[in-house]
Image (cartoon, grey):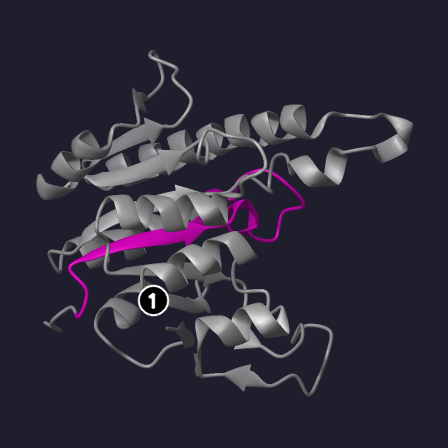
Amino acid sequence: MPRPVYRRIVLKLSGEALQGKKSHGIDQAVLLSISRQIKEVRDLGVDVAVVLGAGNIFRGQENIGSLGLEMDRSVADYMGMLATVINGLALQNALENIHLDTRVLTAIEMQRIAEPYIRRRAIRHLEKGRVVIFVAGTGNPYFTTDTAAALRAMEINADVILKATQVDGVYSADPLKVKNAKRFTNLKYIDVLKKGLKVMDATAVSLCMDNKLPIVVFNMHQKGNIKRVVSGEKIGTVVS
């Protein structure tokens, strides 16, 4: 059995990742695949926390001022935060179907659905071997779920953020559109910011840079990749 190089990780999943080939919503096959990969990592004894986006349901910024309707940015962002709760509950259900203990912790209190986010409680759940799912972003508008991932990772003393994407790393341009786009193996935080590379938003990258928290960007659709990254294999792009 491979020895993990990280003892505690934050896995950042976009909402689009959950929709698979569907135009919206949640693809149950993708959800099951992600859950099984998370179980592989838990079986190595690694603490796992997950931060979810909601682009498969509602993306706040895309709805501001659309069709002449002036939706307030704060309203749009709160709607997006609530959509992450739907994804979090779906992931919790999938994980518990394969016998993993989980807890959903929300930055916006909703007592009948999930526990309120409390840092010490989150750490205690991880110490007990539970997968912790963070939803509702930071609980504040104007901050993305990327920033929530960076913030939660530092609060729970994670060793790394694993950014699961649709491609196998960070490229100089969109590899799905630009044939000769260059893939980077290693990047410095400052290079990501200067070049405007689409790793995570600038606030999240700056937080990671200030606290020396590495980010690994990899293709989540390649089965077993999460375990490979945790085991130290050279997968994707490392930002450090």
Point 65% across, 76% down: residue: 175
Image quadrant in which the C terminus is located:
bottom left
**Residue 26 is covered by the magenta coloring:** yes
In the picture, the quarter occupied by the N terminus is bottom left
Q: Looking at the picture, does residue 219 appear above or below residue 83?
A: below
Residue at horizontal 57 percent and vertical 26 percent from the top: 78
Give the side of residue 150 with respect to residue 124, left or right.
right
Q: Is residue 103 left or right of residue 219?
A: left
232 sits to left or right of 3:
right
Task: Decide which of 24, 160 is in the foreground and name it.
Answer: 160
- Nearest the viewer among 42 and 170 is 170
- Of all residues shown, which one is farthest toward the top? 112
List x then y, in percent, for residue 182: 60, 86
- Residue 193 is situated, as x and y percent measured from the top left of the image, at 56, 68
> Which residue bears the numbered disc 1?
214
Q: Which amino acid does label 1 sit on?
A: Pro
Q: Residue furthest right?
A: 68
Q: Does the magenta stretch include residue 108?
A: no
Magenta extent:
5-30
Of residues 164 and 147, the one drawn nearer to the viewer in this rendering: 147
Can the viewer see residue 139 in this picture? Answer: yes
**Depth order, front residue of 111/196:** 196
At 50% from the left and 61% from the top, the residue drawn is: 165
State whether residue 111 is above or below residue 225: above
Element marked by disc 1: loop
Neighbour tally class for label 1: few under 14, some 14-19, many 20 plus, Cα within 10 Å: many
Q: Residue at x 65, y 83 (%)?
A: 181
In the rendered image, which quarter is residue 185 located in? bottom left
Place of residue 88 in the rendered image (x, y in percent of width and height, measured from the top left): 40, 34
